[in-house]
Amino acid sequence: MAKLMKKALLMATFSLLFSVPATSLEKEVVRVYSSRKEHLVSSLFKAFEKETNIKVDYLTGKDAPLLQRLKTEGKNTSADLLMTVDAGNLYFAEKEGLLQAAKKTDNLLEIPTHLHSPTLSWFALSKRARTIAYNPSLVKKSELESYEGLANSKWKNKLCLRTSKKVYNQSLVAMMIGRLGEKKAAETIQGWVSNLAHPVFSSDTELLKAINAGTCALGIVNTYYLGRMQKKDPFVNIKLFWPSLQNGGVHINISGAGITKHAKNKEKAQTLLNWLSGKKAQELYAGLNLEYPVLPETTLDPIVQAWGDFEEDPTPLYKAGELQIEAIKLMEKNNYK
């Protein structure tokens, strides 16, 4: 009997610990769901913890499963902040009611309007340029103009692309629909497909290797993939081309974050979101994955700085989400695999 009473007491104590509202200690923890790989966020979170004394518990995974988990958990979620990549994913999270508006304070005020949700449900934390990469032994810079220019027949059997299944290309085409209209965007995709030198690649890295080897003369990639290659081999035979604003500008996407709809620690989530958009975190971001910071005047990694300046497409990034379904349908219809 004594053993049973002791066991019952222990079970009651255990239950109490996990059913009582958050204690003062619990309030010093912020919980994050992140689709960014652990090595890209762990050092950021450690720096935040050291500076603020707020502990970060985080769960990493792929975009779709994390978004589905957040949706399924509803009010029972433990996540206070969602971190993910691509404006399309952030737009989807917002439309599914998974996020809430943040206070636009301090560092968040400096983030350009086109890089955050109109409702303040999500904010960009880093920028990723998706532009034209080319082999200078096979292509002259003067021959290049724009993304739609790659549909020109002069690039027959010279162009390589990553699969249309990747959200990066879905967002690129969505922004093209917004800028050019559906008819012109469709013509561009038809031209791309006709010009392919190789079946679509599963990754930007494989595409860049093919450009370097001369299998392809040129393609469209996120710049940080080239940066990773250049870290290993500074003499990679690949250059970047930046479309001018006159030709639509450079397509920009983002990694970003938003406070979850049912955040238990909204105040701490706001603190983390604001910190991540501050100078220290922005410099860490820029170095960790060779991306572009969202705050002006932030120091760039030397590899990134060497690529030169560019004019980015100023179209509000929520359009990438708003038109993404149309983009997917357009790519399917025009045989972009």
Image (spheres, rainbow, N blue to C red):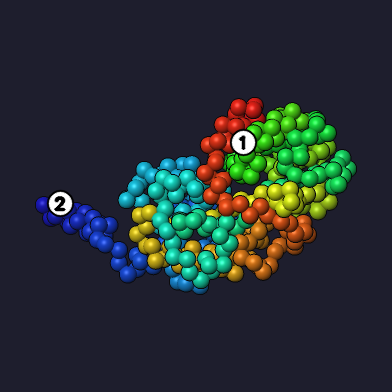
Label ID, residue 161: none
Residue 160 vs 22, above or below: the answer is: above
Q: Who's the residue at 34% across and 65% down the image?
A: 26
On the question of residue 129 being in view, the answer is no
| Residue underneath mark 2 | 4
Question: Around disc 2, counting alpha carbons within 10 Å, would you say few (fewer than 14), some (14 to 19), or many (20 or more)?
Answer: few
Numbered disc 1: secondary structure:
helix
Q: Where is residue 297 in the image (x, y as percent from the top left)?
A: 67, 69
| Picture quarter with the C terminus | top right
Q: Distance between the residues labelled 1 and 2?
A: 71 Å
Instruction: State which tag comes first along the sequence, 1 or 2.
Output: 2
Residue 315: % across, % down: 61, 52
Element under disc 2: helix
Res 294 seen here: yes
- Tell whether 216 sits left or right of 281: right
What count of labels does the image hold? Answer: 2
- Is 70 or 178 nearer to us in this picture? 178
What amino acid does circle 2 point to?
Leu
Residue 190, x across and y down, in percent: 69, 30
Please give the residue where the numbered disc 1 appears in the rendered image: 182
Instruction: Point out the residue furthest to the left here.
Output: 1
Residue type for callout 1: Glu
Whether tag 1 and tag 2 are in contact, CB under 8 A, the answer is no
**Front one among 251 and 234:** 251
Question: What residue appears at the point 53 percent right and 57 percent down from the top-left corner?
Answer: 116
Nearer to us in this view, 183 or 220: 183
Nearer-the-camera pick, 111 or 126: 111
**Residue sitting at 36 percent across and 43 percent down?**
72
In the rendered image, residue 322, in percent from the top left (x then y), is placed at 52, 44
Mark 1 surroundings: few (<14), some (14-19) or many (≥20) residues within 10 A: some
On the picture, is 136 further left or further right than 297? right
Q: Is residue 335 left or right of 241 when viewed as pictured?
A: left
